[in-house]
Amino acid sequence: MKPTYRIAILAMSAIGCAVPGVARAQPSSESAAARCAALSRLQLADTTIESAVLVPAKPAEQTIAGEVSGYPGFCRVVARVRSEPGSDIGVELWLPAQRWAGVFHGNGSGGFGGTFALGYSGMVEGLRRGFATATTDTGTAPATPLEGDVLIGQPAKWRDWGRRSTHVMTTTGKALTRAFYGKEPRRSYYTGCSTGGQMGLIEALYYPRDYDGILVGAPVIDRTWGHAAVLWDYAAANRQPGRLLSEAKLKLLNQAAIATCWRQGYALAGDRFIMDPMRCQFDPQVLQCTGGASDTCLSEGEVATARAFYSGPTDRNGKPGFFGWLPGSEMPDTFGWSFLQNQANAQPAFGSLFKWVFGANWDWKRFDFGRDMPTVDARLDAIVNDATRGSLEDYAKRGGKLLVFHGLADTLVPTEQSVDFFERQAAQVGGAAKLSESARLFMAPGMMHCGGGTGPDAFNSTLGIPPRPPSDDPQHDMFSALIAWVGGEAPERITATRFAGEGSGKIAMQRPLCPWPQTAVYRGVGSTDAASSFRCEAPPKP
């Protein structure tokens, strides 16, 4: 399962999570227990403190299966903030009982939110570093990450999800942190991916004083059209019979795309992914059957489906209206092309957003993009698309640092959307070089949505994918790189790791991730599995 939606088993109520101690003096556990209990009586505007409980430390244990990691004691606080009728934002905060590093750390959610659990993997990492660490249910409970039908007719909850919940989590979390420790945090960081990525961008664009550093992955920027792209794919594969792409056909497409991009110079021999798919040209018609149906070729209908996935939504004349998926993203995966075209409830993933506009009886089969998307945007654009507007200028002026990463094989949030965002921001501040002083984008070849895929995806400790040890190394871990950048050391490259097997710890490959618009280029000598065999270069001018 992908990191964005992983229910963070290691972190459920912090039981069983791996959190080494940090060497900073703090008050005793007895005073921490009293201060934690006192938080339940704290008075904050529009806020109810539902619980404040000290979770005692648990030492690591040796078992027959090996070492089971322990965790330090912390104060676990759950609060609800209701600032207008219909609004109900949940906030969960973990406060280290000892050795607080003086840092507040906010975490994002995923999909339609509705649960704290999507923030737990980031909170585990924050607690490991000695940070006071928080997350939010985005105000959408009882929605689930993949299902938002319960939000029909609840515009206050749309506003919570679209912008308000992250700022509320931050202000509430900082107030509780200040009450517990008796002083303000000296630094504040935010981390999140997918919907959590959008939440982080909105913080930078509209609440520039909330965080000193923001790390986001695969950010949803144009929310309405992002959902439309998923609907477009589902319709392409399901409106007519014979257009679904089997797992065998997806593998065939993937192999052909890699081979084509290799011949064009955008992939390396032996790789199972494409280094630079945005410049590669691939038409699935090269696989169209010339004889009978076979797993070694695509039918005319299957070619049409693949073309629709690559193009993204178009108008009746074939003019692109949004972004599609890049060559190399065809892999069968948890949130890959199979997920986009096959849904157990016979409706497109994340289709609830359209029900908010058209009602519970909305039928995807009657949706017309040219006719209906203007209605969707008129109803929801001002509520859920704030990341398509605004400028990073104020965030840059106050010294804030923004790191964005995006997988080049993502099939839930188009990679090119992040490039478009950076190009727009660069134009506003005077060019890419000026923007790079405060914001940098790193694209990860072969990585799917927030992680997974066939490329090296271990470089962000907050997503539950531990990078090459130690995870505090800013050369290998993006969260550590963000912290170092806030301290004055800008990241010039991040080394991403692919391990030989889950939990094996054996490195199969490492590649450098380069700050946009640079890409990693093979030096021509040395192993392609070694990061040292690559350099970061700006692309040639057209």
Image: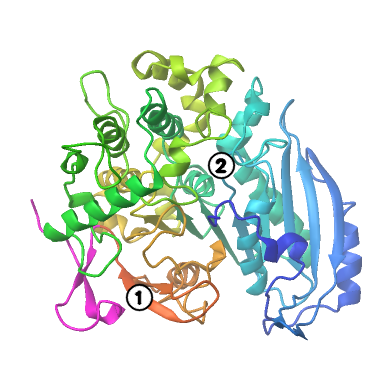
Residue 283 image point, x, y percent:
18, 41
Residue 251 in the figure: left or right of residue 4: left
Mark 2: few/some/many CA within 10 Å (<14, 14-19, 20+): many
Read off the residue under disc 2. Answer: 111
Q: Is residue 318 above or below residue 48?
A: above
Q: Residue at x 42, y 65 (%)?
A: 457
Return the residue found at the far left: 542
Q: Is residue 108 above or below residue 24?
A: above
Q: Would you say residue 371 sits in the magenta stretch?
A: no
Q: Quadrant of residue 300?
A: top left
Residue 297 image point, x, y percent:
24, 43
Read off the residue under disc 1. Answer: 510
Return the residue found at the far front: 292
Of mark 1 and mark 2, the one earlier in the sequence is 2
Helix, strand or loop for disc 2: loop
* Mark 2: amino acid: Gly
Q: Is residue 33 above or below residue 450?
A: below
Residue 36 image point, x, y percent:
86, 63
Residue 79 in the figure: left or right of residue 359: right
* Mark 1: amino acid: Gln
Q: Would you say residue 518 sits in the magenta stretch?
A: yes
Residue 183 image point, x, y percent:
72, 65
Q: Residue at x 66, y 59 (%)?
A: 120
Q: Residue at x 47, y 78 (%)?
A: 468
Asked if one can make out residue 184 in the rendered structure from this viewpoint, the answer is no
Quadrant in the picture for the N terminus: bottom right
Residue 375 in the figure: left or right of residue 110: left
Give the residues drawn in magenta, as a range: 517-542
Q: Quadrant of residue 18?
A: bottom right
Asked if one can make out residue 359 in the rendered structure from this viewpoint, the answer is yes
Q: Is residue 355 above or below residue 419?
A: above
Mark 1: few/some/many CA within 10 Å (<14, 14-19, 20+): many
